[in-house]
Image (cartoon, helix red, strand yellow):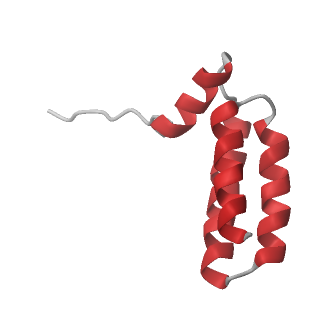
Amino acid sequence: MRSTQKVTLDAEILAEGASSGEPVSYAEAKEIALLRQELRACWDRHDRTAAHAALARMAKVAGNDNELAAEVRRWACRFG
């Protein structure tokens, strides 16, 4: 018998939607994931300029989401 697997969103992304009281859309979740990926790449390249641009976009996406805003602050501390 063959089992089927469900594709689920990352628990971290789902938690972000829950913290603000409304679910995160697929487009928002994808944008957040891509921004995190960009920030990790900037960290590896030591590219502060690109990191600050990605942080600005992430802060805009964060809006009233306290957990995502805290993540933006943590990344900002890393890049100075």
Tell me which residue sits at (68%, 47%) in the image.
32
Rendered view: 47 above or below 19: below
Q: Residue furthest left?
A: 1
Q: Residue furthest top?
A: 21
Rendered view: 1 above or below 44: above
In the rendered image, residue 16, in percent from the top left (x then y), is placed at 60, 32
For residue 34, say whether it is visible: no
Res. 79 image quadrant: bottom right
Tell me which residue sits at (58%, 21%) in the image.
18
User: 70 or 58, which is in the foreground?
Assistant: 70
Tell me which residue sits at (60%, 80%) in the image.
44
Q: Residue furthest bottom?
A: 45
Tell me which residue sits at (64%, 48%) in the image.
71
User: 80 or 29, which is in the foreground?
Assistant: 80
User: 41 or 63, which is in the foreground?
Assistant: 63
Quadrant of image for the N terminus: top left
In the rendered image, residue 27, in percent from the top left (x then y), is placed at 73, 38
Rendered view: 75 above or below 32: below
Res. 78 image quadrant: bottom right
For residue 51, say whether it is visible: yes
Res. 37 image quadrant: bottom right
In the rendered image, residue 70, in percent from the top left (x then y), is placed at 66, 43
Quadrant of image for the C terminus: bottom right
In the rendered image, residue 49, in percent from the top left (x then y), is placed at 84, 75
